[in-house]
Structure formats: structure tokens, C-alpha cells
Image (cartoon, rainbow, N blue to C red):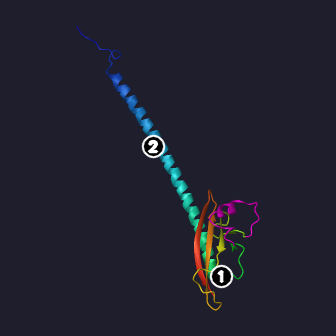
Amino acid sequence: MKKTTLILQNERGAVMMLVSLMLVALLTIIGIAASRTAFTEVKIAGNEYRYQRSFYRAEGAVMEVVHRLENGGNPAAALPQWMDRDETRINEDTVFDYWTDNDRKRVVVPRAAVVDNDHTSFVAVHHTTGSGNSLDMGKPTKHTFSIYGRCGDRGQVILKVGYSNVYE
């Protein structure tokens, strides 16, 4: 007697199909997780790029002030509109509010920097004569400044740099 095997009665392929489906589901989950991780990494890299770009623009604004102070003569004789002598108006605690509060009447007007006229500006504070310097009128006097550079493109970066120079 001959034994015939029908394909429908053979169950050996069912286990293979179940394993294949589980493997496809596992690979799909791994693919989705990798895709989400890659998307997050791209967003992080984009944010880092924008932050560095804003940082360098704010630094460019500070360097513009340094250039003006080195090549423009003694600013204490006639303060520019972007400079103040009052450290209580512009300091580390108030500078953020100083740029964001548009309703306040300002004594000092932030100046747009050449680096990026639309998003970057600067202000400076002229401090009193540095300690240990001679106040004799015939000698050069050391002046110290706090320079604030700001870039407000997609967020805000504010830099503060101290600067000293001797003017005759």
C-alpha cells in the first residue's frame, strides 16, 4: 500500500513561517528604532550648528567693538551711543532684559554689528580707571570695558568680554 502525503497535511512549513514572521517583526522594530535615533541625532547636530553659528556671530560683534576701541581713539572723551558708564544699567544680571525689553527708554542704543545686521548687535560699558594706575594728567590712563555681543537668530547667545586699553 502506497502512502500519499498531501501538502495540506504537512505541518513542517508552519513553524518556518512563524519564525519568518517573528524575524520580520523584530527587524521592523529595530529599523523603526534606528530611524528614530538617526532623526534625533540629525536634530541635535542641527541645533549644535545653529548654536555655534550664533556664538561666532556674537563673538564677531565683540571683535567689532574691540576694533573700534583700538582704532577710534579715547571713547571716554565722547561716549558713542552704544556705550554707557553706568554699570548698574548694563551688567551680567540686566543685559538679557536690556535686549529683550523694547518698551524701556534706553540711554544706550545697541548697535547692529557688521557680521549680521539683522540678528547681531553689541553694547559696551566703560568702567572707571583701573586700579593701580596713575591719575596724573600727563601719563596715559588705562581704561577697562565690558563688551556684550549678542546674536538673536533662532535663540539668543550673549557674550561678555572684558577689554583694557591705554589711551593718552
Q: What secondary structure characterizes most of the magenta part?
A: loop
Nearer the observer, 42 or 83: 83
Displayed quadrant of residue 67: bottom right
Question: In which quadrant of the rendered image does the C terminus lie?
Answer: bottom right
> In this orientation, which residue lies closer to the viewer: 111 or 37?
111
Residue 70 is situated, as x and y percent measured from the top left of the image, at 61, 81
Residue at the spot 58% in from the left edge and 76% down from the top edge: 163
Tell me if residue 14 comes above or below residue 99 in the rendering.
above
Residue range in magenta is: 86-107
Residue 63 rendering spot, x and y as whole percentages: 59, 73
Residue farthest top in this picture: 1
- Label 1: which secondary element: loop
Q: Is residue 61 magenta?
A: no
Q: Quadrant of the N terminus?
A: top left
Q: Which numbered dot is residue 34?
A: 2
Q: Residue at x 34, y 26 (%)?
A: 16
Cα–Cα gap, marks 2 and 1: 56 Å
Q: Hey, which residue is sitting farthest left in the picture?
A: 1
Q: Amino acid at mark 1?
A: Gly
Task: Name the amino acid type tagged 2.
Answer: Ala
Q: Is residue 98 magenta?
A: yes
Image point (56%, 62%), residue name: 53
Front-most of residues 167 and 40: 167
Location of residue 69 by image quarter:
bottom right
Identify the residue shown where x is 51% and y is 51%: 42
Q: Which residue lies most toward the bottom here?
A: 138
Rendered view: 53 above or below 168: above
Q: Is residue 27 left or right of residue 164?
A: left
Q: Badge 2: how crowded within 10 Å, few (<14), some, or many (20+)? A: few
Q: Residue 33 in the image: state x and y as whole percent.
A: 46, 40
Which type of secondary structure does the marked residue at label 2 adopt? helix
Q: Which residue is mark 1?
A: 72
